[in-house]
Every structure is written in C-alpha cells, then in structure tokens.
Amino acid sequence: MDRVLIAGTHSGCGKTTVTTALLCALRARKATVNAFKCGPDYIDPMFHREAIGIPSQNLDPYFSTGAQLRAQLSGPGLAVIEGVMGYYDGIGTEGLASTWQAAAETETPAVLVIDPRGMYTSAGAVLKGFLTFRRESGLRGVIFNNTPPEMYPGLRRIAEDAGIKAFGFLPRDGRISVGSRHLGLITAGELSNLKEKLNVLGALAEEHLDIDGLLTLAAEAPALSMSSPHPAFGCRVRIAVAQDEAFCFMYEENLSLLRAMGAEIVPFSPLRDGGLPEKIGGLWLPGGYPELYLDTLSANVIMCRAVQAAVESGLPTIAECGGFLYLHDMLDGIPMAGVFHARAYRMEKLRRFGYTELRAGHDNLLCRTGESIRAHEFHYYDSEDCGDDFTAEKPGGGRSWPCVHATETLYAGFPHLYFPANPAFAENFLRKACDYDRIHN
C-alpha cells in the first residue's frame, strides 16, 4: 500500500481528529483507503471504521514482529495509520513498541500533529526536538491542530525554518468535539450526530489540509516484502461473539485470524437477544462498557442464564475484561450471569494499565503449561476473584501477578488477548470448539 502515518507530540494533541478528518476527505474523493491504529486501542478504530465504512486494524510493534507489521500493509490503495501517545512514547524510557518503531519497521513516512495552543515560535523548537531526537526520525511533515487560520502562515514558515514541510492545519470547531470517559473517547456508536461530525471533519480537511501533498508523500513509501497468511485450520465451526454497545472492544485481527482458520463469526447482543446463537462451538465475550448498561444486561435474565449454562456445560469460552465482569455474580451490586460467585466493582483509579506477557500455570483451553502470549490490560474495575491460572508480567521482567481463570474449556480474566502474537492459541481454541461442535451439534 501507499501509506502515511499520522503521529503526535503527545496524547490529546489531535491525532484521532486529524486522522479521521483525512479518512473522511479521502472517502469523499472515492479513494481506496484502509485505516490502522498503532497500539492496543479499540475506540479510535471505531471512528476510522465509521469514516471509511470498513474495519480498522491495529498495527502494534509489541504484539507483532516487523514481518507481521509489514504483512498487514498488503493490498491495494492507501493506508492511513494513526499513532499512539507521543511519537517516541512506548515501553520504558527507551520507548519500545512506539509509533516511531511502527513507522521504522514499515518504512512509513510520518507526519507530526502539533497543537500550538499557548505557543508560536516555540513550535519550531518542538519540531526541531522531534526531528533530531532519533538519528532517523522518519518525520516528513507536520499538521497543526486547533489552529486559527490567521496563525497558519506564520506556523508554516516556522516549520520550514525547522526543516520540515507543513501539510496544513485544522481550525478549532465546536461542531467536531467528542466527549470522553474513563477509558478514552465516547465510542462512535454512542454519538447520534456522528455522521454530521464526520461530514464537517471531511469538509475541514478538504479545505485546510494539503491532501494532494499527503497522497504524494504516501506514494513515496517503498514497497514491502510480504509473508504468506496463516494456513486454514481445517475445521468449519461457528463462534458466537458478543458485539453491541456493552461489548465492543475486540481486535479486528483476532476475528480475521479465526476466519482464516475456518471459523464463522456469529455476532449476538447480550443486551437485546433472547439467547445465544444456535449450533455454535465456541463463545467470545470481549471487553467494552458493561458497567454502563448494568440494568439492561441484568434484566435480560434469559441471556444471563443461557451464558451461564453454556459456560458451565463446557462450551469453549473466552471472556476478556468486560466479558469477564459479565460472568460475575454481581457487577457494581447488580446481578449478572453468575458463572463466578464473586463481586466485581469500580476502583477510583486505573487498576491495571499497559502491556503484559501471560504465562500459563497449567494446561488449559488456549495453551499448555509454560506457554505464553502477549496481552494488554486497561481497566478501572477489580474482582474479588481475578483467578490465578496464568501469571502476568510487565515487559522487561518488571512486576508480575497471578490472573485469569483457565480450564480445559475456559479463559476468563482482565487481560485482552492478541491472537496473532501467538496463533497457536487461536488454533487450540478452534480445536476445542470443533470438538464441542461435533459432540453437541
């Protein structure tokens, strides 16, 4: 793919706004465009998907090798990649698995978003610092966000004096603001006027960004060698995946890998449906915001009992974070599915945050004793019984802690899994799902 990466000086500088605006403008131009997000993010890809009408993928150097990252950028058209945090921010002071590393591994030209509020000439010093911090910064341009039109000509000259090309700006506009909550932005599905906001963003991008210049820059990205996709597992099986407002945090790559191995993904809604889909061999309850829909989830007693019965009968099940909370007796004092006889409750601050590596303490649904997979946690909730069948360890041999309930048919805990980091976990899940399917369906 032709490709360009939209990076930022820090979280909150406007990367998502600029990326979504660019995607909207490109879609209006009828361009073939694909969206990617660096880092373990679920919410920003929702806005990408709404902007271009197809799923966005995560492009994460912690979960994936350089070869895997490059393989994701196959196919026709243009790839627009949104960075995470600040351009050089990652694990530890070295910034491992940063947006900069993703750009370097994929040889993608990067454009830095800077919000110049509270500065003017000093923007040049910021740009100089980013350009020289690494010997090969990969930065090829800058876009100014929240910028009054009358300021832009001066900022463009400041950028040129710093040695970098300006590709335009986005002005402040109250019509495009999106609120936030404890895990990030309000999700795209919750905004009743999202289409209007996207139309405004696209129009602003067309008017104020140098889109033709960005397309020329993207076309300068060198061709990449691609590895072959993972072979099909060889068994067709239906996997029920919870997908609604309460359960919406799922890596698209997980679903793609399962499909490539032969799974049929069957979406359902714990909020609205009267039971699980028929003739399924496996169940996946992803993360999300179940805490915002407690009364509706609890009132759907038929679904709660169906999930409880399915899990307890041995249906191969993965329940991550919000899905794990749903399996408790009580979530914030409200009855849930009742698989785990424990309470889950909100903490005043983040309970766990960041990348981890999970190592199994015994054979289970996904792996054998001692095998590992990279994962991610980000939650304000805790449980009276988090499980202890895996050990989570921070990258670089830092803190570790017991976590996850794991049996021959169940994985349930706070860590979110990324199957491409160890596809054998996906194979094991599907193998158990196929076995269940043959016996019960």
Image (cartoon, rainbow, N blue to C red):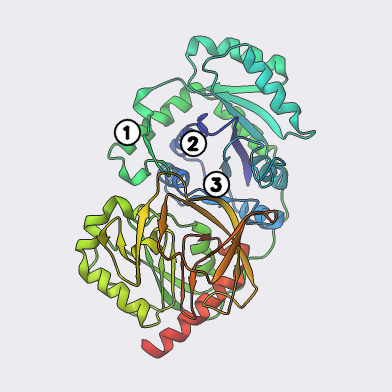
Q: Nearer the viewer, mark 2 or mark 3?
A: 2
Quarter of the figure with residue 72 = bottom right
* Residue at 71% in and 51% down: 224
* Callout 1 amino acid: Glu
**Who is closer to the viewer here, 36 or 355?**
355
Figure check: 164 above or below 439: above
Figure check: 253 above or below 150: below
Quarter of the figure with residue 184 = top left
Tell me which numbered mark, 1 or 2, is placed earlier along the sequence.
2
* Callout 3 amino acid: Phe
Q: Nearer the viewer, mark 1 or mark 2?
A: 2
Label annotation for residue 196:
1
Label annotation for residue 16:
2
* Residue at 48% in and 78% down: 407
Element type at mark 3: strand
Tell me which numbered mark, 2 or 3, is placed earlier along the sequence.
2
Residue 108, can we see it?
yes
Tell me which numbered mark, 1 or 3, is placed earlier along the sequence.
3
Quickly name the residue at label 3: 36
Disc 3: CA contacts within 10 A as few (<14), some (14-19) or many (>=20): many
Residue 137 as seen in the image, left or right of residue 86:
right
> CA–CA distance between discs 1 and 3?
23 Å
Disc 1: CA contacts within 10 A as few (<14), some (14-19) or many (>=20): few
**Who is closer to the viewer here, 385 or 123?**
385
**Who is closer to the viewer here, 39 or 379?**
379
